[in-house]
Each structure stands twice: as structure tokens, then as C-alpha cells.
Image: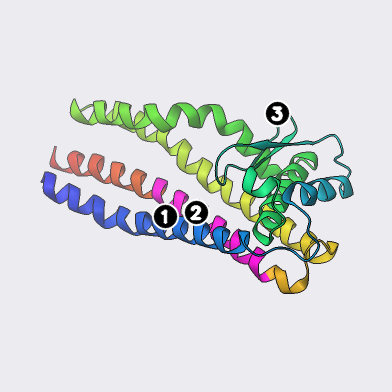
Amino acid sequence: MLLGNYGFYLLISLPALLLGLWAQFKIKSAFNTFSKVRTATGMTGAEVARHMLDQNGLRNVQIEQVSGTLSDHYDPSSKVLRLSQAVYSTPSVAAAGVAAHETGHAIQDATNYGPLKLRGLMVPTVKIGSWIGPLIFMIGFAFSSSNLAWVGIALFSATALFSLVTLPVEFNASNRAKEWLANSGVVYSSELQGVHKVLDAAALTYVAGALQSLSTIFYYVFLLLGRSRRD
């Protein structure tokens, strides 16, 4: 039975896992490729972000350089846009796309974009549920306590819900970036294809993450219902 359960887990989780690996390959490949393509305007990622922020009346948002690769993010609590070195100081198509995407999050924050606010409210619950949910489920399952196991599933479900809410947040930020870059003159029309490839590859990683969370929940439910039928 254990082998059967393990095989079923592989069956439902393998597609999401493979998609995740493919998404990671795509984003790294696209970013590396278009990091070598210099924009005609010669604007660095930091300059692109500053221009986009200022055009949207967000002069109060600061831009900082951080370490790491693809570690770029917007911090709504401190109103700071943090860009990795490869984006902050590089005048490339990839840097322009990533910088504009992260700036899109700052604009979402300033305009009270609903899904972003919801995701922010979910963070404390997700931090707890992502690690304690599976633990509680395993304890409940091991000791044949269905109620405790369901509590574990409910806690971990917050992680899946968070990943689903993240999808419109990320898609919207990318759409804002693409639209602004297409109309601002920061990148030329011939360079937009590279921007699209980088941002679309990044979006795929979030889809893969959501599918992985959902497949894990489905497996937990399968185990629990299977035991209930045997009992």
C-alpha cells in the first residue's frame, strides 16, 4: 500500500515538478540571454524603475541594490524597490523588463490593488501553515486522528491559496510593465520581444508553484480519504 501511495504521489506531483523545472530553466535562459542584449537607450534597470516610478507619481519610493540573482522585489512595508546587481546597474533588455515588473508592484501598492492587499494579509498565516500544516497532518495521519489531519490540511491550504492569489498579482505587474515599456520609449519595439520572453518565463514559475501546492493538498486528501474508506 505504501508503494501504491508513493506511486500515486509521483503520478499527481510529477507534472507540476517537471513544469517547475522547465519554468526555472526558461527564466534563467531568458534572463541570461537578454541580459546580454543592450537597450538602445542605454538605461539601466535602476534608471528604468526610477523613470516609471516618477511618471506614476511615486517619487517617495526608493530604489536599492541587493545581492543575489533574480532576487528583485518590492517591499510594500518600507516602500522600497530592491533590485539585484544584474538588474540595478545593467542597461539590458532583461534588466528593463524585470525593473518595470517590480515597479508594477509598487504601482499596485499605491493604487490599492486588491489581490496584492489580500496577499499581504495572508503572509502571517502562510508562514505558519507552510511548515506546521504538513507536520500536523503527518502526526494526525500517523496516530489515526482524522480531525487533526484535516487541521493540518486546512493550514497547508493557506499556502495553496496564497500561490493562487499570487498569480493575478504577478500577471498584472507584468502587464503593467509591458504596457509602460511599449509606450514610454525606454525600450524600442524591436526589444519588446525580449521583455515578453523574460516576463512570460517568470510568470510560468508562479503557475508551477501553484500547481505543486495543489497537488500536495490533493495527495494529502487522497491519503486521508483512503484510510477512512478502509476503516
What's the mark number on residue 20? 1
Near mark 2 (Cα within 10 A), the count class, few <14, some 14-19 or many ≥20, is many
Q: Is residue 99 left or right of residue 17?
A: right
User: Which numbered disc flags the more N-terminal residue, 1 or 2?
Assistant: 1
Disc 3 to disc 2: CB gap under 8 Å: no
The residue lying at 18 percent from left, 53 percent from top is: 7
The magenta stretch spans which residues? 193-213
Q: Say what amino acid the circle numbered 2 marks.
A: Thr
Q: Which residue is mark 2?
A: 205
Q: Is residue 202 magenta?
A: yes
Which is nearer the eye, 188 or 114?
A: 188
Query: In the image, is residue 78 above or below residue 12?
Result: above
Percent x, y for residue 224?
25, 39
Query: In the image, is residue 206 above or below residue 81?
Result: below
Percent x, y for residue 187?
77, 64
Q: Which residue is mark 3?
A: 77
User: Which numbered disc flags the more N-terminal residue, 3 or 2?
Assistant: 3
Q: Say what amino acid the circle numbered 3 marks.
A: Ser
| Distance from the alpha carbon under mark 3 to that under mark 2 | 25 Å
User: Which numbered disc flags the more N-terminal residue, 1 or 3?
Assistant: 1
